[in-house]
Image (cartoon, helix red, strand yellow):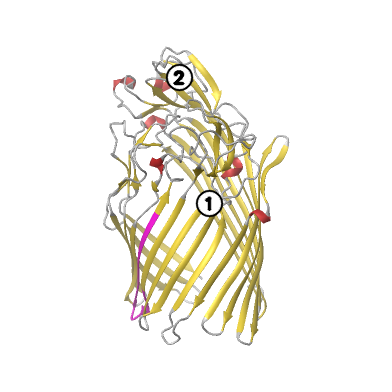
Amino acid sequence: MPHPNHLIVASLRNDDSSSRNAGVGVNDHPNVSVTGEGLNRIIYLAWNWTISRSTYLELKYDHVQMDYKSGPNISLGYQPAWDSNAMDRMGYFQTAAGYFIGGATASGQYVGAASETNTQNFFRDEIKFVLSQYLDFRGHSHLLKAGFAFDDGGEYLERKANGWGNIIYYTALSASIDPLRRPGFRARYYPEQAPQDSRGRTYSLFIQDQVSIGERLTFILGVLANRDEFSTKTSTGKKTFLTFDFDDEIQPRLGFTYMLDKKAGDKFYGSYGRYKNMDNRSLARAAAPLRVYRSDAYFLVDGTKLSDLPQASETGKVILPGLKPTSTDEFVLGYSRPLSKLWSLEIWGQVRNVKNVIEDYPTVNALTAPSRFVYGNLNGALKDIDGNVVAGFENVVAKREYKALSFELKRQWADRWALTAMYTWSRLYGNWDLDYAPGTSLFYASSYIQDAPGLYIQDPLRTGLMSGDRTHIFKAFGSFEVYKSLTLGAYFRAQTGRPWEKRGRDYYGNYYAYLEKAGTRKLDFWANLDLQLSYTVPMGGRFQGIIEARIMNAFDNQIVTAVDMRSDQPTFEKATSYVSPRKFALTFYLNF
């Protein structure tokens, strides 16, 4: 603190990591493991300036860096000579009936080696200015805030296939690949190609007024406007290929709080906000005119190569004119009331709706060979680059709606204990589920959704509970001072299990096709308890030590959190992941 009116805060976090024999799933042979090296770094700087008793300036900067590089523990070389009798040396192979490696691997498991080498580095630099001004008038006062922000982030991606990449077996290839529908293989791989350096920039302007009228009524009126630019860097320089200007991203904020009874101190409140969901930088990678892509090679069982072409959904995409940014509208309405000097009760409802979802989709709806992909909004009739409605896509509207009703009972700290308990009933419903393939490397605005048969959101089976739905959630936080400077804390959570549904193979051979209504089934209800015991050690002067002991998952509940949804596999409905077992951590903090 160089001056009484100035406060400067600086912090640095650096985390180097390495992994050995990683990336092995429940259906994988250990040979598919990878070795990886990572770096996570966060730099944070803040300057707060109290200009006067009624004027305040904040300046914040942060830098986030996440680097990761991995490679297969077993190298197969790049595209070895194809041998249908040695699939474990061709790539990352999903076994099938008649192809049991060594006669010991069950159908549906994965053998061979990891499918590619991978370098994937992310970064973000962000700076924010906020000026606050307090104004006081007779009968009303204002807290005005205005600010500017600049956010620059991106991804560096470089990949190359190990062997022939990811391989699956078909008992009958599609007619577009082989008119005779003979059995064969599809190898999906990353060819030798230049790396991709994607960038996204956001410029933000906002102004807000918090108006207090008398002692009982407060309004919040504000608006945020963003400008988003998406670009890619190549050997010839930077190319900006998509821009949403300030007038495309007007985001109002409206809210009020009204005290119904001054004696009771209760309040009735509500708010509305629109949020443009363009801060996810993966659109810069997905929609770039030149991007890292995969190819599909098809082989007959005798080794004959039928075709080897880049995926239509990953190259040559066109961004349609008039593309709108995805947005979310949120409404909140609530009531809060003190029950006594220490206890209070709060009830509120919340609704969120997603609009103008951006996705890539084919403009040729040939059920055997979707092609000519474009970027557009899934908000009605889908059109091609000439403005014509695509056959079979006359009414395609992506829906994702969240509704919730919450109750919170709180006791303030007194007599050495405090408690907060909350119950939420909620419903996450729609047909656009970005969580539909947990554990896979999918990215926003260029998922498999709407790419081909078995993936179209107009399929009636796709409308239902989304995988992120948790209908019932109860949480309780408590703390109790056992003895002077010795405090016991507890966090209890109980919730409905994750919805899921039976899956089958889609056009691409993945298990993303719904064979029953979304969210038809649910995993078991489960509960978890975490405990914390902390002791404050006085050390004199400005120094203070804290010894903290934590137990996570005190019940040691090995609850299933995911199952195999592949209906044609012998492991269907079997658990694929569990809640982490009980853990103990002992930590010492030094405060000064």
Q: In the picture, residue 349 is in which quadrant?
A: bottom left
Residue position marked by numbered label 2 in the rendering: 175
State yes or no: residue 416 in magenta: yes
Q: In the rendered view, tell whether residue 504 sits above or below residue 398.
A: above
Q: Residue at x 46, y 75 (%)?
A: 268
Neighbor class of circle 2 (other Cα within 10 Å; few <14, some 14-19, many 20+) is few
Q: Residue at x 42, y 20 (%)?
A: 173
Residue 461 rendering spot, x and y as whole percentages:
38, 41
Gap between marks 1 and 2 measured at Cα: 37 Å
Residue 309 rendering spot, x and y as whole percentages:
55, 23
Q: Which residues are magenta?
A: 410-427
Q: Give the secondary structure at mark 1.
A: strand
Q: Is residue 209 left or right of residue 580?
A: right
Observer-nearest residue: 475 or 399?
A: 399
Residue 563 rendering spot, x and y as whole percentages:
32, 41
Q: Residue at x 34, y 49 (%)?
A: 498
Q: Is residue 527 left or right of residue 376?
A: left
Q: Is residue 87 left or right of residue 104?
A: right
Where residue 355 is drawn, which disc sits there?
1
Q: Residue at x 31, y 31 (%)?
A: 569
Q: In the picture, residue 44 is in which quadrant?
A: bottom right
